[in-house]
Amino acid sequence: MDGEISPSEVETLLETDDPPRIVDIRSPAAFRQGHIPGSENVPFNQLPQRVETLADADHIVTVCPHGQASVQAARLIGSYEGTDTARVESMHGGLTEWDGEIEAESTAPDEGPEAPF
């Protein structure tokens, strides 16, 4: 792990030609409710089995609600042999400190045919 990165730095990096891979370690349900656009959901409990999918990344930023569990996730990712040359950081303060855009997935239930009124 290469330390922590501020949410404003992450937002700036996402606007570059070579943005970091954002790994959101929350549950799929929490991820669907709102996440950083372009981030990928790898729940913390699945990270050991899925860390190899990050092997091609040059820069990885882990994200969680408050910036604590993402530190552990960044350490785990950084210790993986396939990511040993990647820059791996945790976003300080987590999503509670994120002022940037949030993307949510629509989970509205099917309401049936349109009502006539």
Image (cartoon, helix red, strand yellow):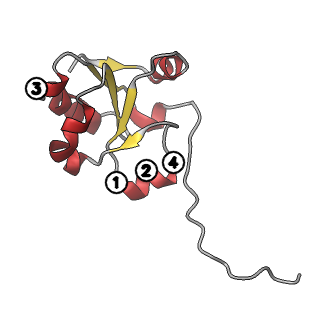
| Amino acid type shown at disc 1 | Ser
Residue carrying label 2: 31
Percent coordinates x, y for residue 74 in the rendering: 23, 29
Residue 61: x %, y % from top left: 34, 27
- Residue wearing tag 3: 81
Q: Earlier in the sequence, mark 3 or mark 1?
A: 1
Q: CA distance from mark 1 to mark 2?
A: 6 Å
Q: Amino acid at mark 2?
A: Phe
Mark closer to the observer (3, 1): 3
Q: In the displayed image of the protein, which residue is found farthest to the front?
A: 56
Residue 49, image x and y in percent?
16, 46
Lower position in the chain sequence, tag 3 or tag 4: 4
Please determine whether, in this image, residue 84 is positioned above or below residue 21: above
Residue 5 in which image quadrant: top left
The answer to whether the residue labelled 3 contacts the one labelled 4, judged by CB atoms less than 8 Å apart, is: no
Quadrant housing the N terminus = top left
Q: Secondary structure at mark 1?
A: loop
Query: How far across and down, in percent of the image, does residue 80 sit?
Result: 12, 29
Badge 1 vs badge 2, beta-carbon distance below 8 Å? yes
Q: Is residue 27 above or below residue 15?
A: below
Instruction: Please identify, in this view, whether the residue under mark 2 or under mark 3 is nearer the observer.
Output: 3
Cα gap from disc 3 to disc 1, whole angstroms: 25 Å
Asked whether 94 or 76 is in front, the reply is 76
Res. 27 mark: 1
Q: Which residue is mark 4?
A: 34
Alpha carbon distance from label 3 to label 4: 31 Å
Per the image, label 4 sits on a secondary structure element best described as: loop
Label 4 environment density (alpha carbons within 10 Å; few <14, some 14–19, many ≥20):
some
